[in-house]
Image: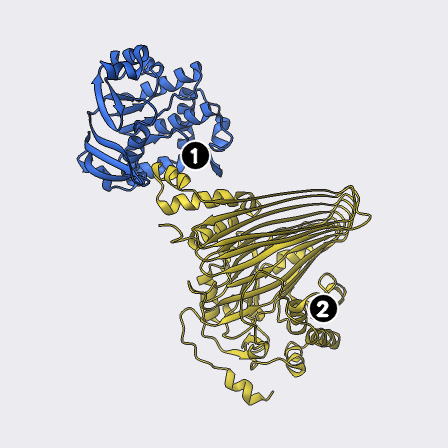
Amino acid sequence: MSQSEIDQLVDQEYKYGFITEIESDTLPPGLNENVIREISARKGEPEWLLEWRLEAYTKWLQMTPPDWAHLDYSPIDFQAISYFSAPKQQGDGPKSLDEVDPALIETYNKLGIPLEEQKMLAGVAVDAVFDSVSVVTTFKEKLHEAGVVFCPLSEAVHSHPKLVKKFLGSVVPQNDNYYAALNSAVFSDGSFVYIPKGVRCPMELSTYFRINQQNTGQFERTLIVAEDNSYVSYLEGCTAPQRDENQLHAAVVELIAGTDAEIKYATVQNWFAGDDDGKGGIYNFVTKRGECRGDRAKISWTQLETGSAITWKYPSCVLKGADSVGEFYSVAVAGKKQQADTGTKMIHIGPRSRSTIISKGISTARGQNTYRGLVKVLPGAVDVRNFTQCDSLLIGDQCGAHTFPYVEAQEPSAQLEHEATTSKVSDDQLFYLRTRGMSEEDALNMVVNGFCKEVFQKLPMEFAVEAEALLGITLEGAVG
Amino acid sequence: MLVIQNLHAKVGDKPILNGVNLNINQGEVHAIMGPNGSGKSTLASILAGRDDYEVTDGEVVYMGQNLLELEPEERAWAGVFLSFQYPVEVPGVKNIYLLKAAVNASREHRGLPELKAGDFLKFVREKLKVMQMDEAFLHRNVNEGFSGGEKKRNEILQMQLLEPTLALLDETDSGLDVDALRVVGEGINRMRSPEQSVLLITHYQRLLEIVKPDLVHVLAHGEIILSGDHTLAEKLEREGYEGIKAA
């Protein structure tokens, strides 16, 4: 790639709605070895990481996209996507908020991200990923005192190379699946969290991802390591501006929990869902997996999925440690012409490991919502317990709900329970609430929030409020 | 305050109400009795705004406005309350959450400020006491797993909180044991005031022994065929609907 090609792409003018006009540094569309070398070079990565990316790329070339999901979409042209976009900066990057491009701050404000000083005092540290490069990291000092590392992954590669090298790809191997392989080859940035032994992270960690650049795939990669006896709660919020084209998002998240460690990972996903007829929207192909490596380790995934045209996502737990615990609490909404195929995998390896799956699928308009889950008990994992509950709620008569629970138990002592319900928001419920003075929309929100309550209870309080509000916005116009 | 004139309604092709006429003044308690399928619950549902029924003729004027034009929630804001024969379960929604939302919706439309959490709790505790209900009720999901009697008490609790101008009580006495009946009946009596009117729908006279109605009507085949004072209810109890019709 030549410098002039790059220059051409810089200074692009944007015409549409809520798009940040900011000078950016974008590679032209296409993927080959040179593009990967270019990404690595721009990030000033060490040789081993470049080799790791190239290895992943070679594996990816030999793989084919998965076709088993209950999803209907045209094949993705991977050569039409640009694999790197970074806001352009002078010098070495901002030292404080004052040095950050005001347009960027404005975008964050529109998203309601608490970057300002007073909001920081509320106790939320934000590592904001804007397109591909983390721009501002707040509260680093306080975390530093506790010994917690919370920084962009690209920074950790330099500041904590041993840790990154040790853990990167150790939960989700390069060739785990097609999209994980692609991510491993071209991943842009993401968060790195390291909680040392015996440390309880003093605050909720939060990252907002946002896809801004047109035709840019976002391939963030997050790595969270909680050493023995440590605790961390992490929240990611995702949103993207409205565009006509489909954009690809293929992220990888790896969690590692040591003995007696606990990781809570919560996601509020509100990527652009496309319009009512299914035009535009994000294609969200994400691999999230946590490993309970030590005894009594605990990992819980909580997610609210309201956006994306397509969601393909199965946050999973590998329960290696004895008495380790995996949890999955999910609310997935498919409205408009959205398609969601989401669920979890609980892999029981350690004896007496336990898992809980609570999945709430809401379908409305012409949305198609699929729960797909696997509970696997390996030989030697004695006295394992799993409880799975899959509830589907239908609003209207043009939507669909589907449930595919898979169970592979190779230990007779395993106790696995599965409950599934499908219900419609009944006219009786809406009428009852309306006679108590709720508007039709408020009545629907009340019924839906009640349906989701078991999951929302698992979100940190301020985000539970946000989740309810987001759900309300998502369901606007679903009745009447 | 409520004038029903020549009300005809059907569900599908089936006529249910065939010209109901009823006039309830402010402060009055009326009881409607009648055999199964006579249209009692339909009448209550139509007054509360359920859209499963088609009104084919007649009109309903409530406090000077055409009631049938209003949405169910607008009727609630205007002071109409329906106690359901079969209260609906709303899984995952705590009773207190619904009660607070309902009270504040009603206050908002009366131009009153929202009740703060503490004030609301005080208010609701007072009413719980009247209904002899445990505070644990507040933290259970709306009607979920409630016994028949608990559901009915919960309806009357809501009525007390919402202080309606017109309360429509659809078979509130069914499924209640003697003690619960007394509590519910006394709850209704506490509502009686010169401003508040009640329309009781019931099969049995026993509730009417506690809540003495000003007028009793007999509804049969979608029409009110007989009206009288509370002695009519006693007569019905003795002679049955067949006896009334024969007379």
| Residue A76 location, quadrant | bottom right
Q: Residue at x 58, y 79 (%)?
A: A79
Disc 2 residue crowd, few under 14, some 14–19, many 20+, Cα 10 Å: many
Q: Is residue A256 above or below residue B145?
A: below
Disc 1 crowd, CA 10 A, few/some/many (<14, 14-19, 20+): some
In the image, the chain rendered in blue is: B
Q: Quadrant of residue A103?
A: bottom left
Whether residue A195 sits left or right of residue A248 in the image: it is right
What residue does disc 2 label? A175
> Both on one chain, marks 1 and 2?
no
For residue B88, the mark is 1
The answer to which quarter of the image holds residue B118 is top left
The kind of secondary structure element at disc 1 is loop
A115 vs A287, nearest the viewer: A287
Picture quarter with the N terminus of chain B: top left
Work out whether residue A74 can be spotted.
yes
Of A399 and A56, which appears nearest the observer? Answer: A399
Chain ID, mark 1: B
- Which residue is more in the foreground, A165 or A69? A69
The chain coloured yellow is A
Q: How many marks?
A: 2
Element under disc 2: loop
Q: Nearer the viewer, mark 1 or mark 2?
A: 1
The residue under the point 42% across, 65% down is A277
Would residue B113 be visible to someone looking at this image?
Answer: no
Q: Is residue A422 above or below residue A188?
A: above
Q: Picture coordinates of residue A248 (x, y %)?
A: 55, 70
- Measured as percent of width and height from the top left, residue B189 is found at 32, 18
